[in-house]
């Protein structure tokens, strides 16, 4: 597994921003200090969530036949990434979201 923490933090912050009603806070006249505090909160949440973001990468080989000769080729691919919440709002890894490689890879 390979995880890029800056990308995962960015994704987590984006999702949190989408979940929070930012137009509602603008209507309530929040101050710059509140905005800074809110940004710090989102950053800390993103750091907490980043450990639960997964990227599953598989590497394997396959034998092919060309012109009567057999050779081995290397195949790799990243098949899934993301994170999910359970019903209590806790981030969990859901391996049912992992996509299977195409059947031509077998």
Image (cartoon, helix red, strand yellow):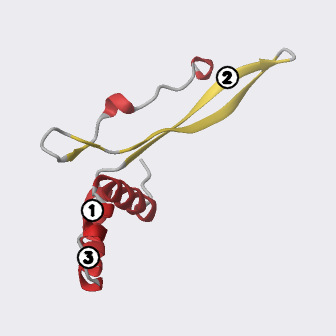
Choose top left, top right, bottom left or bottom right for residue 69: top right
Q: Relative to the observer, which residue lies in front, 16 or 96?
A: 16
Q: Quickly name the residue at label 1.
A: 24
In the rendered image, the quadrant that contains the C terminus is top right
Crowd band around label 3 with a 10 angstrom C-alpha radius: few (<14), some (14–19), many (20+): few
In percent of width and height, residue 67 lies at 87, 17
Q: Earlier in the sequence, mark 1 or mark 2?
A: 1
Q: Nearer the viewer, mark 3 or mark 2?
A: 3
- Picture mark count: 3
Say few, some or many: other residues with alpha carbon within 10 Å of mark 1 (under 14 / 14 to 19 / 20 or more): few
Q: Which residue is identified by label 3? A: 29
Q: CA distance from mark 1 to mark 2?
A: 58 Å
Q: Could you tell me if the residues under marks 3 and 2 are in contact, i.e. CB atoms within 8 Å?
A: no
Disc ID at residue 63: 2
**Which residue is at 63% across, 25% downward?**
62
Residue 33, quarter of picture: bottom left
> Could you say where residue 29 lies in the image, as x and y percent from the top left?
26, 76
Q: Residue at x 63, y 19 (%)?
A: 104
> How many neighbours does mark 2 have within 10 angstroms: few (below 14), some (14-19), or many (20 or more)?
few
> Mark 3 or mark 1: which comes first in sequence?
1
Q: Is residue 73 left or right of residue 52?
A: right
Q: CA distance from mark 3 to mark 2?
A: 64 Å
The residue at the point 69 percent across, 32 percent down is: 73
Residue 77 percent across, percent down from the top left: 57, 38
Describe the element under mark 2 as helix, strand or loop.
strand
Outermost residue on the top side: it is 68
């Amino acid at each position: 597994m390979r995880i890029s923490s800056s990308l995962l933090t960015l994704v987590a912050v984006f999702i949190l921003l989408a979940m929070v009603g930012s137009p509602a806070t603008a209507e309530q006249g929040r101050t710059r200090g509140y905005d800074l505090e809110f940004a710090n909160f989102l950053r800390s949440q993103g750091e907490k969530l980043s450990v639960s973001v997964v990227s599953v990468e598989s590497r394997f080989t396959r034998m092919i036949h060309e012109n009567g000769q057999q050779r081995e080729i290397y195949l790799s691919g990243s098949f899934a990434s993301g994170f999910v919440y359970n019903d209590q709002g806790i981030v969990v890894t859901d391996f049912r979201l992992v996509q299977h490689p195409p059947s031509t890879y077998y």
